[in-house]
Amino acid sequence: MRPTLAALCIALPASAFAQDLPATALAGLEATVRACFAVAAPGETAPACLGAGARPCTETPEGMTTIGTMQCLQAETAVWDDLLNTEYKALRAQMLAQGDGLNEKLLAAQRAWIAFRDAECAFDYARWGDGSIRQIVGANCLMEMTAARAIELRDKKDGS
């Protein structure tokens, strides 16, 4: 579930990029993202807290560069991706238990969503030409779309 977007130069998981940042820059990031996920109302795919995990990281000296900001965004994306994978697995298990073939439809939908996310973020990245901001725009796109999908999957489960 963690395909990468080559155009965004994200050839490694976000956690590998975050290794270059000091632990102080990443302190509290995971807890902040998980809290954001927990308070996102059903159907709210762009909660106000989105990006709050990366924000303190980008305010450190290491995070104030293009590469540092991108790494901070990728670190937050990694947490959203973990939440997405957890919600996908739970929903898939629910669909398998129902035995009505919805698990195959979910798999097809998820694969199509990944292709859409990658194409959409590649478009956002390309719009900025050779500007260094394209890396931040692309990383932010991946974070926002991954967060939205994690919340969408959570909300599709029975009992949600």
Image (tube, rainbow, N blue to C red):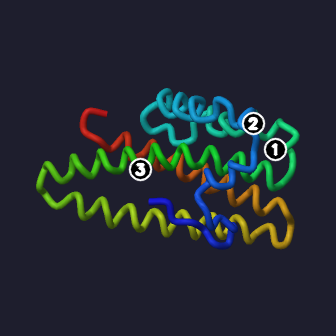
Q: Is residue 85 left or right of residue 138?
A: left
Q: Secondary structure at mark 2?
A: helix
Residue annotated with mark 1: 63
Residue annotated with mark 3: 85
Q: Secondary structure at mark 1?
A: helix
Residue 66 location, x and y as percent? 83, 54
Residue 99 location, x and y as percent? 11, 55
Q: Nearer the viewer, residue 95 or 30?
A: 30
Q: Secondary structure at mark 3?
A: helix
Vertical arrangement, residue 106 with respect to residue 18, above or below: below
Count residues near mark 2 (Cα–Cα under 10 Å), then give few for <14, some for 14-19, many for 20+: many
Residue annotated with mark 2: 25
Sequence-earlier tag: 2 or 3: 2
Residue at horizontal 51 percent and vertical 67 percent from the top: 116
Residue at horizontal 86 percent and vertical 45 percent from the top: 64
Residue 5 location, x and y as percent? 60, 68
Q: Quadrant of the N terminus?
A: bottom left
Sequence-earlier tag: 1 or 3: 1
Which amino acid does the dot numbered 3 rest on? Answer: Asn
Which amino acid does the dot numbered 2 rest on? Answer: Ala
